Image (cartoon, coloured by chain):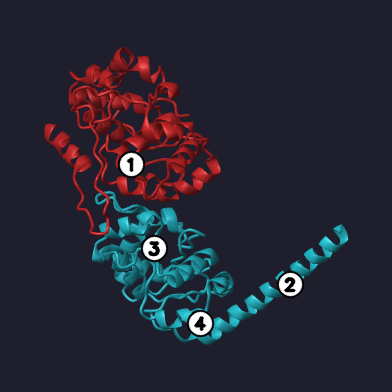
Amino acid sequence: MKKMTTLMALAFTGALSTPLWAADAVPHEAGIESEGYVWNKMEGEKLEALKARGDALRGEIAFEICQGCHRKGALGRDDGTYPRLAGQHASVLIKQMTDVRAGRRDNPKMLPFAGHDALSVQDIADISVYLRSLPSPADNGKGDGKALTKGKQLYDKDCATCHADNGEGDGPKFYPRVSGQHYKYLLREAVAIRDGARRNANPMMVKAIKKYSDQDLEALSDYISRFASK
Amino acid sequence: MNHKRSQILTALLLAGGFWATAHAGDAKEIAASVCAACHGEDGNSVAPTFPKLAGQNAVYLQKQLKDFLSGKRKNEAMEPFLGSFSDGDTSALGVHFAREKTAPGTVEDATLVEAGRKLFQDGNTDSGIPACAGCHQVDGMGNDRYPRLAGQHQTYTLAQMQNFKSGARNNDKGKIMRSVAERLTEAEMKAVSEYLAGMEVK
């Protein structure tokens, strides 16, 4: 599992070679690895996108460049490579997109399709409003179902306070909806957050799951993947 | 005064109508006298190095023509003809070719089609290649923003992907196609070109 973790971290942060025409440097901003890191600082493009009035129809058009990976209807893939975005809080989507653009969340695969050449701040607001309105059916990827009691116990103890009893999250607080998400994606991100690889993570969450084993995270992700979808 | 104003308006509208009709006529004439030699009389080129324009989306065609005129898109074969039409003709030319019917393409290497289909519809999650269908649509018909690819000559499709990859073609929206092509292997580009050539034309 440790090996798997390393592999996943590599796949996630692995540098893709930069082509000659891509003159823009890969953005990098201080994250959770830095002293004085403040989670979800309200500034820059994030603030602009939150202030902008999003339009779902424009968002559907702008989302065309995203749906090659996140799939039609933003349902993602159950192999965990691309998360489900349908039904996610607009605030969360804005935070994650602007974090990727700013280099607070490392995602070289996504960057060219969410960077400044590809999307405007208004596009981000539009896409977020479009995605939040989409249904998230119960066909998301699940775990093996073998440790659900343990998963529930961990969730109720450490996760429900922020992500809510049924995984609805909390839009105004930027806590993601986790219900309807694919098991493999939940697990991959939980591992990355625990190990510090997801640099825009909330320190409260890192602290909450710091001592979790890989098996704990598997049980937890499996339990979450079975929440009733929106 | 109001009456006079409305008379002027009517005259302007009529003139506008004649102007548009004249231009539609111009487009047909330009297509026959300028474009046909390479792109075919009905917009279905015979030589596979030249793209089929028949059935291409009008707005997309217009943008490409404007880009050729402004120099944003460069092509040696197109260069000698850029003096034969102007910015004002691009809209009518786009509409003209969009109305023509695309001739079906011919698959040259059928063994590549399935790999091409998979890449087009599903992408490559290992190398981060989005499914082409995301923008170009599941049926390869594209829309105003992204070109129709169904039925296009594989030679032309392949050359465009290679040009996006090298950066020789750089008039794509938001560097999106260059970012995708950068991740495509030569084998993937060939496979998807074959799939597109054999795709059903509507």
Chain seen in cyan: B
Give me the C-alpha separation between circle 4 and circle 3: 22 Å
How far across and down, in percent of the image, does residue B48 sit?
38, 79
Q: Chain of mark 1?
A: A
For numbered disc 1, what is the local secondary structure? Answer: loop
Q: Which mark is residue B15?
A: 2
- Disc 1 designates what residue? A82
How far across and down, in percent of the image, does residue A176 sit?
38, 27
Q: Chain of mark 2?
A: B
Please report the residue visible at 26 percent of the width from the left and 57 percent of the height from the top: B183
- Disc 3 designates what residue? B171
Q: Residue furthest left?
A: A3
How far across and down, in percent of the image, does residue B88 sit?
57, 72
Of mark 3 and mark 2, the one earlier in the sequence is: 2
- Disc 4 designates what residue? B84
Instruction: Please indicate whether residue B176 sits to the left or right of residue A37 in the image.
Output: right
